[in-house]
Image (cartoon, rainbow, N blue to C red):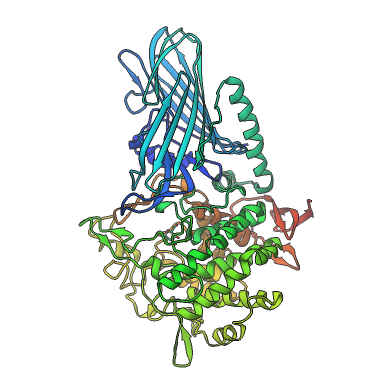
């Protein structure tokens, strides 16, 4: 199928390529870095769902040692792109099979490697490394397990024990939380080389003959918490047999997920690239859900945000529903944490953690941003006030049920979760002047904090409670608060469209300074300054970080008319900075619906190709926020199906309202809906046909 290939080396791209060429298997992520790189180049083998906290620093997901460290030297040269200029250098990512490879040619030596994380085996990674010399040359090769780990808020290991033998390295790390990470690696070297070992690294001497190929094979395996006495071996045979079964397992994920786009190569590539970034995250075996930066590292503490439920769940529900169910099971499992958080803040029910880790307890600190000038932490209120997340989870529960028809999730804890969320919103609200108001919140637009009656939050809360009521009645369980809920939804204040059909983002938004993004930008003292909080440049203005009212219209798209969508899109579009990667896809969905196809297409492409760009924001107010953007990839899929294809489910079947744009002559895809899989083909004239596939 297709490959992402980049030629040449530019040290400014190192961090971006780490994300762009990322490998993953839904639990582990290995950044797209080169073998000669170390922690300074952000080499990372990230484990999701395995967290640790060092002293009072932020608790974050763990990075493991790097089993694939290699540095090749001759007497007077180090063959590393960081030190010696190469004649040619190429990195590629085979998207169909999730295999990374590189080839670098120097004057005397050609180095190539290939690696993958086994999709079909627990926590196993493999690498093949090849050296070819253009003349007879004496080489020293350092190869092994680099235990000098890149960590944002570490050190996470209180002890690192290494046992090294002729071919094997075993690492046992104990974390600050007394958890154990064990890693076993096996290195197989070509014949006729001699080596010594120290600190996990082998120093190999090779008298290389001209044009002979010298191949090294590495197999590494991780064990979390339980020590294993399994033996690990590596050889050419093992490598190729693992590669074969891995390729079969990964490429089969594409069978249900691929989208064929004809007539526009860029659209095809970008869409497939974003689907790749979703597929490396989805593995029904793991019930740890997906962090905001996927498996690309420790950014955002490896925590789960609303990104997963709102932006990732639709893709997985239509293509790999067991993965989508896993997201909901994670929220059900962490319900006790959400109940504990509600209690802590004096509310009833379930108040889900804005940044949720393994137990569901809140990982988001009170000072989540730093001032890039003073380096002082800035007080933020995301954890206390971004309450819409609890409603978003129930929205996702309903989306999942609508798409899959799987009502068993309700009996498996889903209904109880909806019940607790309903209780939470009712206890959070304030009764004033004959109506319930949801005061002092943050909506999706994080630049305006502690505002009242955010349209998104209020509408989503109402929706979540209505979903709860529907199922509590149907199942006659958890139904003791039904009349209270009925009263609440009937009296909940909802920011509704005014005479101009505009929905005010929150109480008082229309009175804010009417200015432009450029004007606000020009007020920044330093480029990385945080725009939000009461002292931020955006706060007194109408400039918003990301789609807020537009996200509401995109999610509850059947509740709002064409005219309302059009007016709000036109109004909010110039004020939206798109400072979050969650923004463009929501505008894209509405853009397609109101026939602003050009912009809608551009925003779809922006969402799909975000991790292909090398000009992203890496810092927010002094905090590193780099990594991949799964929500943007999932959002691109949503823009395609709900925007360009206008998908609705009517009477359990897909119905489309397509508008193919930008020379796209044909699209085909498979969608699983209510236990049937549909193969749908959409043509240039926007007609389509479909067959029930299985
Ligand atoms: C966005 C949030 C998002 C988070 C993680 C923030 O910048 O404003 O909406 O959940 O990033 O992606």
Number of marks drawn: 0
Name which quarter of the figure residue 686 lies in.
bottom right
Residue 246 image offset from top left, x and y in percent: 62, 34
Identify the residue shown where x is 41% and y is 76%: 346
Residue 139 image offset from top left, x and y in percent: 39, 13
Looking at the image, residue 399 sits to the left or right of residue 504; the answer is right
* Outermost bottom residue: 433
Looking at the image, residue 352 sits to the left or right of residue 515; the answer is right
Give the quarter the ligand 1 occupies. bottom left
Q: Nearer the viewer, residue 595 or 174?
A: 174
Q: Is residue 459 visible?
A: no
Residue 160 image offset from top left, x and y in percent: 37, 35
Where does the N terminus fall, quadrant-wise? top right
Looking at the image, residue 20 sits to the left or right of residue 14; the answer is right
Residue 135 image offset from top left, x and y in percent: 42, 8
Q: Is residue 335 visible?
A: yes
* Outermost left residue: 374
Instruction: Say if 545 sits above or below 620 in the image.
Output: below
Instruction: Say if 519 sits above or below 435 in the image.
Output: above
Q: Nearer the viewer, residue 658 or 228?
A: 228
């Amino acid at each position: 199928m297709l490959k992402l290939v980049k030629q040449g080396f530019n040290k400014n791209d190192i961090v971006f390529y780490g994300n762009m060429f990322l490998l993953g298997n839904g639990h582990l992520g290995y950044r797209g870095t080169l073998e000669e790189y170390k922690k300074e180049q952000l080499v990372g083998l990230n484990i999701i769902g395995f967290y640790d906290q060092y002293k009072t620093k932020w608790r974050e997901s763990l990075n493991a040692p790097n089993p694939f460290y290699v540095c090749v030297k001759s007497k007077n040269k180090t063959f590393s792109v960081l030190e010696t200029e190469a004649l040619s250098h190429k990195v590629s990512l085979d998207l169909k099979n999730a295999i990374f490879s590189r080839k670098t040619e120097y004057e005397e030596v050609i180095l190539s490697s290939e690696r993958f994380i086994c999709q079909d085996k627990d926590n196993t990674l493999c690498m093949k490394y090849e050296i070819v010399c253009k003349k007879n040359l004496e080489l020293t090769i350092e190869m092994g397990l680099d235990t000098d780990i890149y960590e944002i808020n570490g050190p996470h290991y209180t002890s690192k024990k290494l046992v090294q033998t002729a071919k094997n390295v075993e690492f046992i790390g104990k974390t600050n939380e007394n958890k154990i990470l064990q890693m076993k690696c096996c290195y197989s070297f070509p014949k006729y080389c001699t080596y010594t070992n120290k600190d996990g690294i082998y120093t190999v001497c090779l008298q290389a003959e001209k044009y002979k190929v010298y191949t090294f094979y590495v197999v590494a395996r991780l064990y979390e918490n339980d020590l294993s006495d399994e033996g690990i071996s590596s050889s050419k045979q093992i490598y190729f047999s693992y590669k074969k079964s891995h390729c079969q397992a990964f490429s089969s994920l594409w069978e249900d997920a691929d989208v064929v786009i004809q007539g526009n190569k860029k659209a095809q590539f970008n869409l497939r690239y974003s689907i790749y970034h979703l597929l490396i995250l989805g593995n029904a075996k793991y019930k740890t859900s997906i962090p905001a930066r996927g498996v690309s590292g420790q950014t955002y503490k490896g925590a789960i945000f609303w990104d997963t439920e709102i932006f990732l769940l639709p893709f997985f529900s239509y293509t790999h529903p067991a993965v989508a169910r896993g997201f909901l099971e994670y929220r059900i499992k962490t319900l006790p944490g959400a109940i504990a958080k509600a209690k802590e803040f004096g509310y009833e029910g379930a108040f889900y953690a804005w940044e949720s880790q393994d137990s569901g307890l809140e990982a988001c600190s009170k000072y989540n941003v730093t001032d890039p000038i003073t380096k002082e932490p800035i007080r933020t209120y995301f954890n206390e006030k971004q309450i819409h997340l609890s409603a978003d989870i129930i929205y996702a529960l309903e989306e999942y049920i609508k798409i899959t028809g799987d009502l068993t999730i309700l009996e498996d804890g889903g209904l109880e979760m909806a019940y607790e969320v309903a209780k939470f919103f009712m206890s959070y609200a304030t009764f004033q002047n004959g109506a319930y108001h949801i005061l002092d919140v943050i909506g999706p637009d994080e630049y305006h904090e502690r505002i009242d009656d955010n349209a998104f939050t209020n509408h989503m809360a109402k929706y979540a409670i209505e979903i709860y009521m529907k199922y509590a009645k149907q199942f006659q369980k958890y139904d003791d608060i039904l009349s209270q809920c009925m009263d609440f939804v009937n009296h909940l204040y909802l920011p509704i469209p005014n005479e101009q059909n505009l929905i005010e983002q929150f109480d008082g938004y229309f009175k804010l300074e009417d200015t432009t993004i450029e004007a606000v930008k020009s007020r920044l003292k330093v480029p990385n300054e945080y725009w939000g909080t009461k002292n931020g440049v955006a706060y007194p203005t109408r400039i918003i970080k990301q789609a807020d009212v537009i996200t509401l219209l995109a999610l509850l798209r059947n509740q709002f008319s064409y005219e309302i969508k059009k007016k709000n899109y036109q109004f909010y579009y110039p004020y939206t900075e798109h400072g979050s990667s969650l923004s463009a896809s929501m505008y894209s969905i509405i853009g397609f619906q109101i026939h602003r196809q050009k912009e809608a297409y551009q925003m779809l492409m922006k969402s799909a190709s975000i991790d292909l760009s090398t000009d992203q924001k890496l810092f927010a107010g002094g905090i590193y926020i780099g990594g991949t953007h799964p929500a943007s990839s999932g959002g691109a899929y949503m823009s395609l199906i709900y925007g360009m294809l206008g998908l609705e489910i009517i009477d359990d079947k897909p119905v489309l309202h397509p508008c193919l744009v930008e020379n796209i002559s044909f699209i085909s895809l498979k969608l699983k809906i209510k236990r049937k899989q549909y193969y749908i083909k959409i043509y240039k004239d926007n007609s389509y046909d479909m067959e029930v596939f299985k």
